[in-house]
Image (spheres, coloured by chain):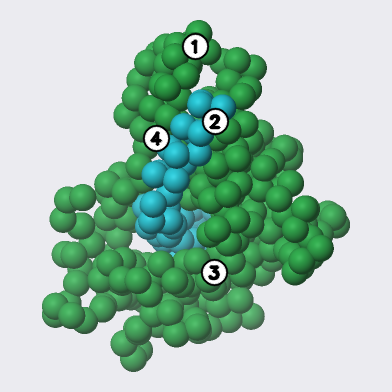
Amino acid sequence: MSVIEISCVDVWRELSNYIDGAVDPELRRRMEEHFKGCEHCSAILDGTRNVIRLVGDGRAFDLPAGFSDRLKKRLQEKLES
Amino acid sequence: MGVSPVRLLMGHAGNIMFATALNSRRPGAKARLATLSASSLQNKTARPPEDEIALIERVCAGEKQLFYELICPYERSVYIAAYSVLQNEADAEDAAQEAFLKAFDHLSSFRREAKFSTWLIQIAVNQARMKRRKDRKSLYDSIDQPQEDEAGDYFPRDFADWREIPSEALQRNELRCALQKAIASLEPKYREVFVMRDIQQLNIAETAAALRITEASVKTRLLRARLQMRDALAPGIDGAWNIRDGNWKKVRPW
């Protein structure tokens, strides 16, 4: 099946929606076709997915040490007041 | 956490290796990434929603001491929401505490159609924004949100191939620093959306609700934020990663 070509710039505009599965099937097909032939865009796609994966694994931020204890204390003070 | 499948891609112990291939497509790569996402460390609460509703009802009915049990699974989410606005540990902790106190006072007004976590995050964002406004007289002016509309297209700056994540880097503090630095480098309006969507893993509608912006704005800002994050973290940038010679290169498509 022939697919209408799409430019790199158009791919970048929709990249985030593509990753979120929020582009219509026709556009998805065109983008997939583009990624097959464009090393740059597929590198950007993979890199962007890596970013999402890296930050999504919960390691980017930790609670400060003692956070829970201080929170419990503050809630306790509130309860007693 | 189980053994990371990405370890299969690793070279000698102690070396960080990008299993890279600019010229060869390896169909397995995406499957491996997908597996890793599934084993993510994100600490989601395992509490069934009906238990949560029951807890809320008991607290509202007077068992106030159960409040901490109710909010305990969301300590991190609320803190991170505040941090995304304030970019400072002490201020974020303070705003998070205030958000929980506020939630305690207004628990009976919680609407069941929203997720409890989203409601808490929304309060945290509000508290943090109020705090930021209050502190403007100090040095916070620069982090206040510019009011202009979304800028035009953002073009990726860098085309480094980055198909795999160096697995050992995941264990290191350097990675955390690189991530925090990259997140801090985003403009506040992009940073807040990125944190809600990709760190807190709220969906588009929840992100829009938490930040009180439209879903269209969430999508536009998210795209910009993700592309900027990729640019900031692509291998070789800012020395955040150790790259073996020849394993990546910068190219321009034009």
Element under label 3? helix
> What is the chain identity of the residue bearing mark 4?
B
- Residue at mark 1: B62
Q: Which residue is mark 2?
A: A78
Mark 3 vs mark 1, foreground winner is 1
**Residue A79 horizontal/vertical position (percent):** 51, 26
Q: Are marks 1 and 2 on the same chain?
A: no
Q: Are labels 3 and 2 assigned to the same chain?
A: no
Q: Residues within 10 Å of mark 4 (few under 14, many from 20)?
A: some
Which chain is cyan in the rendering? A
> Does any portion of residue B61 appear in the rendered image?
yes
Query: Could you tell me which residue is drawn at 44 percent across and 14 percent down?
Result: B63
Which numbered dot is residue B182?
3
Q: Which chain is depicted green?
A: B
- Residue placed at 38% from the left, 27% from the top? B69
Badge 4 amino acid:
Pro
Q: Nearer the viewer, residue A14 or B234?
A: B234
Regarding residue A12, the answer to whether it shows in the image is: no
- Distance (Cα) linking label 1 and label 4: 21 Å
Residue A72 falls left or right of residue B79: left
Q: Nearer the viewer, mark 2 or mark 4?
A: 2
Measure how far apart labels 3 and 1 are at the Cα level. 45 Å
The circle drawn on residue B73 is 4
